[in-house]
Image (cartoon, coloured by chain):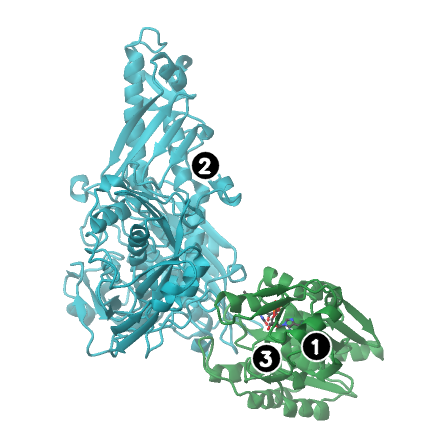
């Protein structure tokens, strides 16, 4: 197995074009597990940790461009106030050691239906930036996840960054785990409310992380945006029903399908309340 | 002659003497040891649970890089099964025939130059099977069952009459799943033959037993076998047997004529070194309206391997837990195509107590009395079966102190009385009577020319603090500072001690060390008494104490001399003495031998909508007799409580019901508590030195785990009104 260590993105893209079998490795918290279990024996590993550009973030025009190689620990520490939803998800990932190594780029690369950042990326309308020697393109997050642990990356492409809007309203992420840390989501949910946008997405409850379009439409159409008042229970219940209806979960050792569907409804109700409260607070602050 | 009066060193919360070695990576754990020229082995395990191997093709594996040998049932000679030990039979010898008895059974061992080569080549071994339909659960009509496997079933009074006379009865079935011991340290064996001499570094809790087993299996004298286990990355019972992989590593070393090292993988740890077997228990209790127990009936069925045994009397403890005139306890085991179970921290009692103490809570609810009051009213003032007074018993104090510290009196009687947002808050408790256990032990204590002393024993420190307490004990008895005492443990060449298990080692080995110290002091005294040059010449033994690093006149510490001086003058590099301890006999003493007692008080928070259970507080009070080291003893109890939290809400080894494959054999999928799951644990010790133990000690290695699951389940009931009779208490259970 070759261990390839490019120091610039251009070099990395050239290598990837030549060796499409090379498996990119960022934090390695997914890749190394697969290698240890011999689930995968690639001809080459493409180490991305020396590429400075991937480990940077920048901000312009109300957007954050988050390098694919920024660790969760840095994301939480440096961007927690501007990307609160993503930081909430990041805080629930693994343990301090995993958060020191693991990256959003790696979460996207692995594309596990249970990956914690996905619902937030979907709900906030993030765009994933991909690059190859052929050029760069960006994809809406919902177009990135194509199947169970499958994504839209071409064999010669790398994920370079994720572009997300700076939070201006309410953002929430909630995850159910069978214990308090170091746990794969039984199910997860994210909601983002800002002027003109209502995003909601589920994790670990379908073959891919997915947006819950009907529930989003319901929020956009029915939330009292202009006169933000507390929401009636019946409103939250309706939202919860729409979210639960969009789930197609399975039974596994972590939880039954029925539990997941039920729990998503509960998470939807609770996070809507919290996100709406934040939105109302920010709306008042602006007025 | 006596030793120094209670120096602060005994009982003091001394830091682990082996702590610096461990945290600096210098403690040689079994998998850390390497020998020149060693080869590495990797196991091939069966992928069916029952049937036969029809073809086993090792050609590809043998051709793989670095491969030295592939052991299969075609190559391994017929080996006898290991001996009967004081804990039961040895596991069957490995690779003796083509039969498969459980999923994950070893079917081959590949030996290669490196671990990676062995692992890679192991995947090239082709095994064809003729699978049979495995027996995997209790209800399979083909399953063979064993009634009263240990002759421990008990009958007292007339339980049917007792139940008939009761005003209130409880009749409930409780189930507990397979749990896996899962010590953090992967078990490993490094075996090296030099002619007929065999040295083995093994992850064992019992070096003397492994030596005896290997000698018998490989037909060599015991004296030519040396087994070392000076440090262990935890065991929880998994190290109480000489498992098939140990035999295979030794056989492989013989075959290739080089040292062979075998380190199990985490998934292999689930099938190779035992587990706590699952069980179904039915408990019937009867009480009169004034909350007096009149009947206890406890039946258990647990799962067992097809050709192996395991000591797991779930129900037996219920016969002696409470004062009650009419009692039946009965245990049954059912054989299935599962990996062999083994004792796992508090074997049988962890499970049996869950059933009994849950049923007691149900009875308290039915009677409308406080659960604590019910236990106090039925407290076993004397041993319920023998009618003898206990050698020590501070269970009432455990209850009183625990209730006080926890604030039990403020607990509302009704379930679902307290809420904090969407969390329902509940409190529950459980009592514990842990059985007494002790085995004979030897030890040697030696004073050396530098004036210090060494304790030597084959007994080992599983991580509990044995090094530390023996060092403290010896320092105390010889009047030496701690730094001048060293303990050498975990080497089968040293005087034989029993297993680190059954919460019995400290008492057994500690008593042997005390005996050795006494004999050693006697020998030293003899030297000085007849020595005109000694300041203690002609002293009456009663007037001499061990203090200040030597022997001193009582009341006149200036008159005396150090051990170094005594040895030097007599031209001796060292002077040692052997000590022994034998377990007490209840009939001779006129007392019932008491194990530890305890009480747990737990608070849980249950998310009403999501069914999440979070343990928010546990108060534990333990009567462990005399505590030799507050700190290591507390750590034992804390670890036990955490194990109990795991048992209550997380741990579940899931076996696929059709294939018999364990579906969650990794630490990612088999959940144990992490820091964020463990609240502050309040641990207190009460009680007096036990009268039946020379040291007054009762073991505390297991008692902390027992009762936690029941206290938590009872708290969950108090929080939610839902009675969960099946562990672990998962999310789905509470919706
Ligand atoms: C103990 C443990 C606990 C965990 N807990 C969680 C958890 O709670 N929640 C959660 O979501 N995940 C969890 N994970 C999984 C993992 O940590 C995350 O998915 C993490 O985000 C992966 O990031 P990484 O940088 O380590 O990825 P890597 O392992 O380096 O890579 C993961 C995948 O992405 C690809 N990849 C990485 N970077 C790029 C790139 N720039 N371009 C193209 N492909 C790329 C790799 O080839 C690989 O396929 C856990 C893992 C472990 C070992």
Residue B125 pos. (x, y %) = 35, 68
Q: Looking at the image, is B370 positioned above or below residue B490?
A: below
Cβ of mark 2 under 8 Å from ligand 1: the answer is no
| Colour chain A is painted in | green
Residue A154 pos. (x, y %) = 65, 81
Q: Nearer the viewer, residue B703 or A95?
A: A95
Q: Nearer the viewer, residue A268 or B29?
A: B29
Disc 3 to disc 2, C-alpha distance: 50 Å
| Colour chain B is painted in | cyan
Which residue is the site of mark 2? B12
The outermost residue toward the front is B63
Label 1 crowding class (10 Å Cα cut-off): few <14, some 14-19, many 20+?
many
Secondary structure state at the residue bearing disc 3: helix
Q: How many marks?
A: 3
Secondary structure state at the residue bearing disc 1: strand
Disc 1 to disc 3, C-alpha distance: 13 Å
Q: Which mark is residue B248?
A: none
Chain for mark 2?
B
Q: Looking at the image, is A56 positioned above or below residue B241?
A: below
Disc 1 to disc 2, C-alpha distance: 53 Å
Residue B667 pos. (x, y %) = 46, 64
Q: Which mark is residue A171?
A: 1
Q: Is residue B684 left or right of residue A116?
A: left
Which residue is the site of mark 3? A267
Q: Is residue A45 left or right of residue B206?
A: right
Chain for mark 3?
A
Q: Is residue B110 visible?
A: yes
Q: Looking at the image, is A214 positioned above or below residue B364?
A: below
């Amino acid at each position: 197995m070759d261990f390839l260590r490019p120091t610039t993105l251009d070099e990395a893209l050239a290598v990837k074009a030549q060796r499409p079998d090379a498996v990119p490795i960022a934090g390695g918290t997914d890749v190394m597990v697969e290698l240890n279990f011999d689930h995968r024996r690639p001809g080459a590993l493409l180490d991305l940790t020396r590429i400075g550009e991937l480990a940077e973030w920048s901000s312009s025009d109300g957007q954050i461009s988050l390098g694919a190689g920024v660790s969760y620990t840095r994301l939480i520490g440096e961007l927690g106030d501007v990307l609160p939803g993503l930081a909430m998800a990041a805080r629930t990932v693994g343990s301090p050691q995993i958060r020191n190594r693991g990256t959003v780029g790696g979460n996207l690369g692995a594309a596990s239906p249970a990956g914690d950042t996905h619902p937030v990326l979907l709900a906030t309308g993030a765009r994933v930036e991909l690059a190859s020697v052929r050029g760069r393109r960006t994809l809406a997050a919902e177009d990135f996840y194509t199947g169970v642990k499958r994504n839209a990356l071409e064999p010669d492409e790398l994920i370079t960054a994720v572009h997300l809007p700076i939070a201006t309203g309410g953002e929430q992420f909630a995850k159910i785990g069978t214990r308090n840390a170091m746990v794969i989501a039984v199910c997860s949910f994210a909601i983002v409310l800002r002027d003109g946008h209502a995003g909601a997405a589920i994790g670990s409850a379908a073959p891919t992380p997915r947006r819950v379009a009907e529930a989003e439409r319901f929020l956009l159409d029915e939330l009292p945006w202009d006169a933000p008042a507390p929401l009636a229970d019946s409103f939250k219940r309706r939202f919860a029903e729409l979210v639960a209806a969009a789930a197609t979960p399975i039974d596994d050792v972590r939880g039954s399908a029925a539990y997941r569907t039920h729990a998503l409804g509960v998470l939807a109700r609770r996070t809507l309340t919290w996100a709406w409260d934040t939105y109302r607070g920010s709306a008042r602050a602006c007025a | 002659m006596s030793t120094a009066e209670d120096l602060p060193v005994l009982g003091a919360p001394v830091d682990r003497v082996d702590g610096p070695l461990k945290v600096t990576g210098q403690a040689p754990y079994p998998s850390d040891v390497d020998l020149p020229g060693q080869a590495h082995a990797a196991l091939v395990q069966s992928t069916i649970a029952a049937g036969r191997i029809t073809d086993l093709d090792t050609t590809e594996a043998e051709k793989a890089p670095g491969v030295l040998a592939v052991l299969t049932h075609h190559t391994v000679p017929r080996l006898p099964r290991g001996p009967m030990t004081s804990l039961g039979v040895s596991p069957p010898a490995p690779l003796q025939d083509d039969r498969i008895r459980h999923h994950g059974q070893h079917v081959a061992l590949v030996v290669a130059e490196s671990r990676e080569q062995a692992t890679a080549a192991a995947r090239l071994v082709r095994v064809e099977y003729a699978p049979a339909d495995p027996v995997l659960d209790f209800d399979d009509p083909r399953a063979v069952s064993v009634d009263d496997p240990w002759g421990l079933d008990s009958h007292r009074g007339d339980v049917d009459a007792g139940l008939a006379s009761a005003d209130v009865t409880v009749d409930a079935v409780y189930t507990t799943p397979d749990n896996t011991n899962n010590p953090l340290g992967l078990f490993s064996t490094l075996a090296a033959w030099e002619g007929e001499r065999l040295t083995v570094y093994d992850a064992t809790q019992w070096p003397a037993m492994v030596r005896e087993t290997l000698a018998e299996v490989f037909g060599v004298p015991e004296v030519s076998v040396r087994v070392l286990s000076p440090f262990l990355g935890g065991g929880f019972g998994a190290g109480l047997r000489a498992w098939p992989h140990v035999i295979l590593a030794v056989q492989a070393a013989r075959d290739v004529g080089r040292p062979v090292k075998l380190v199990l993988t985490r998934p292999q740890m689930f099938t190779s070194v035992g587990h706590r077997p699952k069980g179904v228990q039915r408990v019937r209790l009867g009480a009169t309206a004034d909350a007096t127990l009149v009947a206890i009936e406890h039946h258990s069925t647990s799962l067992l391997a097809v050709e192996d045994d395991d000591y797991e009397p779930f129900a037996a403890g219920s016969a002696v837990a409470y004062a009650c005139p009419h009692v039946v306890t009965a245990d049954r085991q059912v054989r299935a195509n599962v990996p062999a179970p083994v004792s796992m921290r508090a074997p049988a009692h962890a499970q049996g107590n869950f059933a009994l103490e849950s049923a007691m809570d149900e009875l308290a609810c039915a009677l409308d009395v406080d659960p604590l009051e019910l236990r106090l009213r039925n407290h076993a003032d004397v041993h319920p079966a023998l009618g003898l007074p206990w050698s020590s018993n501070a269970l009432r104090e455990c209850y009183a102190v625990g209730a006080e510290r926890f604030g039990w009196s403020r607990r509302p009687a009704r379930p679902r009385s307290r809420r904090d947002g969407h969390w329902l808050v509940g409190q529950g408790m459980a009592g514990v009577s842990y059985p007494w256990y002790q085995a004979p032990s030897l030890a040697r204590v030696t004073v050396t020319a530098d004036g210090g002393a060494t304790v030597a024993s084959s007994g080992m420190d599983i991580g509990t603090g044995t090094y530390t307490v023996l060092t403290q004990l010896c320092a105390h008895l010889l009047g030496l500072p701690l730094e001048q005492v060293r303990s050498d443990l975990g080497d089968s060449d040293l005087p034989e001690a029993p297993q680190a298990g059954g919460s019995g080692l400290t008492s057994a080995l500690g008593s042997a060390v005390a005996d050795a110290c006494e004999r050693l002091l006697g020998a030293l005294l003899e030297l000085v008494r007849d020595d005109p040059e000694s300041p203690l010449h002609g002293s009456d033994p009663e007037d001499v104490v061990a203090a200040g690093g030597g022997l001193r006149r009582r009341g006149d510490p200036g008159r005396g001399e150090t051990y170094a001086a005594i040895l030097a003058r007599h031209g001796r590099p060292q002077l040692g003495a052997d000590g022994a301890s034998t377990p007490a006999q209840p009939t001779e003493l006129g007392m019932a031998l008491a194990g530890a007692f305890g009480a747990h008080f737990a608070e849980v928070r249950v998310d009403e909508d999501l069914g999440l259970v979070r343990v928010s507080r546990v108060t534990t009070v333990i009567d462990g007799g005399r505590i030799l080291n507050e700190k290591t003893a507390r750590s034992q109890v804390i670890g036990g409580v955490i194990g109990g939290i795991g048992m209550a809400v997380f741990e579940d080894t899931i076996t696929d019901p059709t294939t018999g494959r364990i579906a969650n054999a990794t630490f990612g999928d088999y959940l144990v508590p992490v820091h964020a799951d463990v609240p502050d644990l309040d641990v207190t010790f009460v009680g007096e030195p036990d009268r039946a133990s020379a040291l007054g000690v009762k073991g505390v290695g297991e008692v902390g785990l027992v009762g936690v699951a029941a206290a938590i389940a009872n708290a969950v009931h108090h929080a939610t009104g839902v009675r969960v009779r099946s562990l672990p208490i998962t999310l789905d259970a509470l919706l």
